[in-house]
Image (tube, rainbow, N blue to C red):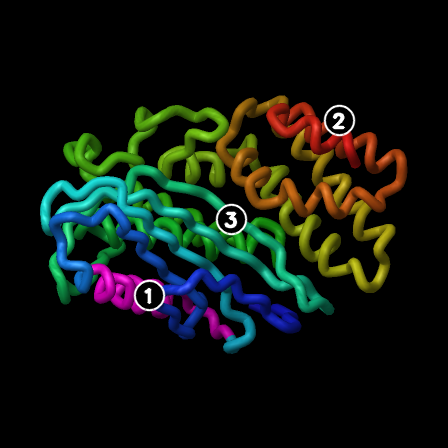
Amino acid sequence: MAKIFSLLLLLTFGGYWLSAQELNATVKINTQQIQMADPAVFTTLEQSIAEFINQKWTTDVFQPEERIDCNFIFTLQKELSATSFEFSLNVQSSRPIHNSDQSTPLLNTIDPYVRFEYEQFQPLQFSANRFENNLTSVLAFYIYVILGMDYDTFSPLGGEDYFRKAQEVVNTVPAGLYGTYQGWSSTDGSNNRGNTNRFWIIENLLSPRMKPLRLGMYQYHRLGLDMMTEDIATARANIAEVVATLGQVDQTYPNAVLTQLFLNAKRQELLELFKRGTPQEKATVRQVMTQVDPANANQYRLM
């Protein structure tokens, strides 16, 4: 994959960090509510998860400066036993902006359904063909989503293969485990704004109805943000077209999870970009974003 990167801005939240292969992953496990388990278990687990994420996931050759910055932030919700836990997981990824020392967020989502069993020094095993354990399946799912979203920004629909791999992860989870390990079934929560799960994330990413928005991710980044230092007016106009596409997609697939993921990642960026937009661009962005993101309508009216 041909990429042109300048200085990478790494989001650092503490925890264990490794640089290897396609991803530069920061892993942080917050366990303030711990009562039964040995705290040392989670130090070991942080390291094991970082090593798991920062291995080889594609056949492409990535240079060190091309690796994708991402964060996996676990927060303990419940100890079921000394070796069984329920966590929420905040997954974030970003992409550098060409000819800039800035980066742009691609993914920022919270998964509330991460339950798994772990004993200290237990190896983290994953198979693409069968379900091994919930932790590695969740990790692999988001790794493929991160890769797919990144590839989509460098070529039209370039992330398709990785979204298919994420779908394969979903398909390996036995239906009999849906009650124990939530987040894999269409009935875990619903396809509404603010209530995402893995089933609906990948359903949206592969849905023909969402294809225009996925195509828009290439225009937004390669023909928008990456062109800002060369032709800011054209770049901003290209991004405004993507926002208009977002509004059209929302008409054909209302309340889609992928729309919410886009808003979570891009809301603040769009507000900053179009403060300096033309009156027509501001009107377009204000109208669409108020439609698809009504809870934040007041912010768009101030552009």
Q: Which residue is mark 3?
A: 107
Q: Which residue is mark 1?
A: 50
Left or right of 153? Residue 34 is left
The answer to whether one can see residue 131 in this image is no
Marks 3 and 1 sit apart, C-alpha to C-alpha, by 18 Å
Q: Which residue is mark 2?
A: 287
Name which of mark 2 and mark 1 comes first in the sequence. Answer: 1
Dot 1, how many residues are within 10 Å of its Cα: few (below 14), some (14-19), or many (20+)?
A: many
Residue 43 within the segment the image draws in magenta: yes
Name which of mark 3 and mark 1 comes first in the sequence. Answer: 1
Q: Is residue 215 above or below residue 258?
A: below
The answer to whether one can see residue 133 in this image is yes
Residue drawn at 88 percent across, 34 percent down: 280
Which of the 4 image quadrants contains residue 43?
Answer: bottom left
On the image, the x and y values in percent for residue 244 come to: 73, 33
Residue drawn at 84 percent across, 46 percent down: 276
Left or right of 294? Residue 17 is left
| Kind of residue sitting beneath label 2 | Gln
The residue at the far right in this view is 279
As helix, strand or loop, the secondary structure at mark 2 comes to helix
Left or right of 174? Residue 203 is right
Dot 3, how many residues are within 10 Å of its Cα: few (below 14), some (14-19), or many (20+)?
A: many
Residue 298 has which mark?
A: none
Q: Is residue 60 above or below residue 210?
A: below
Residue 246 within the segment the image draws in magenta: no
Quadrant where the N terminus is found in the figure? bottom right
Marks 2 and 3 sit apart, C-alpha to C-alpha, by 24 Å
Q: Which contiguous range is marked in magenta?
A: 42-62
Which of the 4 image quadrants contains residue 289?
Answer: top right
On the image, the x and y values in percent for residue 114 come to: 28, 43
Depth check: give the residue in front, 303 or 54: 303
